[in-house]
Image (cartoon, rainbow, N blue to C red):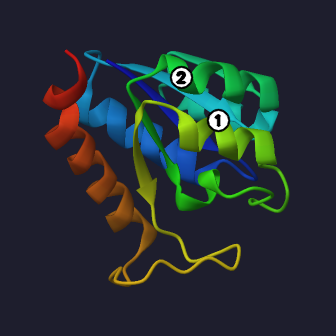
Amino acid sequence: MRIAVIDGQGGGIGKAVVSKLRQAFEDSIEIVALGTNSLATSLMLKSGANEGATGENAIVYNVSRVDFIVGPVAIVCANSLLGELTPLMAKAIAESPAKKVLIPLNRCNLTVAGVETKPLPHYIDDAIEIVKAQRGDCCV
């Protein structure tokens, strides 16, 4: 199973997601770190991603080659992450056949209705549990 973790800006969310995925699945999965910038990619690689790539083309190319995409909900919104996420990236992520597990952060003028307010680490734990639960639905 291949999981793409997408993040930008400082890479803190991606770093935490990669670390928790690696802890939950150990070496039974392949994690692809896709950063909108080199800092985000580097932090995700240091946290245990198998491979990483940076920038628009890397994200557009790789999102159709994974089983899951995990990242903040902003990754499907053009010009989010302070403009780091381009419209082409958002389109490619949204249209990817991969299952998307999006972490609901109320930033970028985006509020997700019906989402319980809780700390970011709890949302990341929820995302890992969703991947675990849906793992059998896509591949082994």
Q: Position of residue 19 (x, y in %)?
A: 42, 38
Q: Residue at x 53, y 59 (%)?
A: 73
User: Label 2 sits on what residue type?
Assistant: Ser
- Quarter placement of the N terminus: top left
Q: Position of residue 123 (x, y in %)?
A: 36, 64
User: Around disc 2, counting alpha carbons within 10 Å, would you say few (fewer than 14), some (14 to 19), or many (20 or more)?
Assistant: some
| Front residue of 95 and 100 | 95
x%, y% of residue 47?
A: 51, 33
CB-based contact (under 8 Å), mark 2 and mark 1: yes
Three-letter amino acid code at the position of disc 1: Ala
Quarter occupied by the C terminus: top left
SS type, badge 2: helix
Q: Which residue is mark 2?
A: 64
- Which secondary structure, mark 1? helix
Residue in view at x 69 percent, y 80 percent: 109
**41 left or right of 86?**
left
Can residue 58 be seen in this snapshot? yes
Residue appearing at x 41%, y 75% in the figure: 119
Residue 134: % across, % down: 19, 38
Circle 1 residues within 10 Å: few <14, some 14–19, many ≥20 = some
Which disc is residue 92 wearing?
Answer: 1
Sequence order check, earlier mark of 2 and 1: 2
Q: Say above or below: 2 vs 108.
A: above
- Quarter-wise, where is residue 136 in the image? top left
- Residue 36 in the figure: left or right of residue 106: right
Residue closer to the observer: 117 or 135: 135
